[in-house]
Image: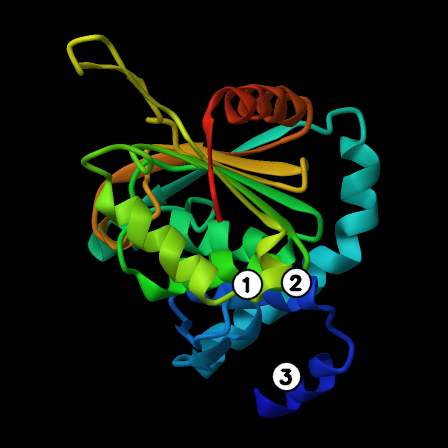
């Protein structure tokens, strides 16, 4: 296995390495070794060398046949892929095509190069989420977030803490790439009449996650959550909706 990985190492782009890492972790043949620098700096620890070799063999075969597959699929560039958060016993009984939400989102965050748009009402102190988000402005990627109840008398403390954690990791120049808005409306009796409830992550206007999961530890590792990864024609429409709500929402000073 070491010889195979060494031979691949010099030829893999970051995108290819992320794809292989996700496949190995999804199959349970490796585990993420996290760092405080975000997903782009993670390593993986192999726990089943033979299983890893089988996955790599399958990926190599798929890569060889890719030109034929692409030629046959050019007519339809749109797709929707199911992702989920499930108990380990349930996940193990499902096809590998049903990938964990956590790994899917973090993979695409690591690949972002231009703009990431996030709608998310609630956060917590899950370190890898906050570090991965902070890593975006540090790389010069614009991060636009719409959340709720930040700029109110009784704030959504989870969102306040998350924003402070992210900004605390950034220099003044890096903060220029972070934009936060608050959507939370009340009537004259201080009753809620509208608020951010959507959960969406849009990467570079190319791929988007839509689903039930908040960016919290429980939603990404413990709950029963469902979502889809969208590519193609639906993504520009989702960008338009997000940008309209972003413009409508109240800016939060950074």
Question: Is there CB contact under 8 Å for labels 1 and 2?
Answer: yes
x and y, in percent, of residue 166 in the image: 44, 59
Q: In the image shown, does 27 or 149 lie closer to the viewer?
A: 149
Q: What residue occupies the far top of the structure in this picture?
A: 188
Q: Is residue 250 left or right of residue 175?
A: left
Q: Quadrant of residue 15?
A: bottom right
Instruction: Tell me the residue that label 2 is attached to.
Output: 139
What label does residue 157 carry, if any? none
Q: Quadrant of residue 213?
A: top left
Q: Quadrant of residue 33?
A: bottom left
Give the label, 3 or 2, closer to the camera: 2
Q: Is residue 19 visible?
A: no
Q: Residue at x 55, y 76 (%)?
A: 53
Query: Is residue 242 positioned above or below 131 on the image?
Result: above
x and y, in percent, of residue 127 in the image: 34, 65
Give the label, 1 or 3, closer to the camera: 1
Q: CA distance from mark 1 to mark 2?
A: 6 Å
């Amino acid at each position: 296995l070491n010889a195979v990985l060494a031979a691949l190492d010099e030829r893999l782009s970051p995108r290819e390495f992320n794809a292989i890492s996700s496949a190995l972790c999804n199959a349970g043949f490796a585990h993420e070794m996290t760092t405080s620098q975000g997903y782009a700096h993670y390593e993986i620890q192999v726990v089943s060398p033979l299983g890893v070799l089988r996955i790599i063999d399958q990926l190599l075969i798929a890569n060889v046949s890719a030109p034929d597959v692409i030629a046959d699929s050019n007519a339809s560039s749109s797709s929707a892929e199911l992702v989920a958060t499930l108990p380990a016993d349930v996940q193990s009984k499902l096809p590998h095509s049903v990938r964990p939400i956590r790994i899917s989102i973090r993979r695409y965050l690591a690949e972002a190069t231009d703009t990431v748009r996030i709608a998310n009402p609630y956060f917590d102190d899950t370190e890898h989420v906050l570090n991965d988000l902070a890593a975006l402005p540090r790389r010069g990627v614009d991060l636009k977030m719409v959340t709720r109840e930040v700029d109110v008398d009784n704030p959504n403390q989870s969102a306040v803490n998350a924003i402070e954690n992210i900004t605390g990791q950034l220099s003044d120049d890096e903060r220029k790439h972070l934009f936060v808005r608050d959507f939370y409306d009340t009537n004259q009796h201080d009753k809620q009449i509208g608020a951010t409830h959507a959960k969406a992550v849009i990467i570079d206007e190319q791929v988007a996650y839509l689903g039930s999961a908040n960016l919290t530890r429980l939603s990404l590792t413990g709950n029963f959550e469902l979502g889809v990864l969208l590519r193609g024609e639906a993504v520009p429409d989702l960008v338009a909706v997000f940008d309209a709500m972003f413009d409508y929402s109240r800016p939060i000073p950074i």
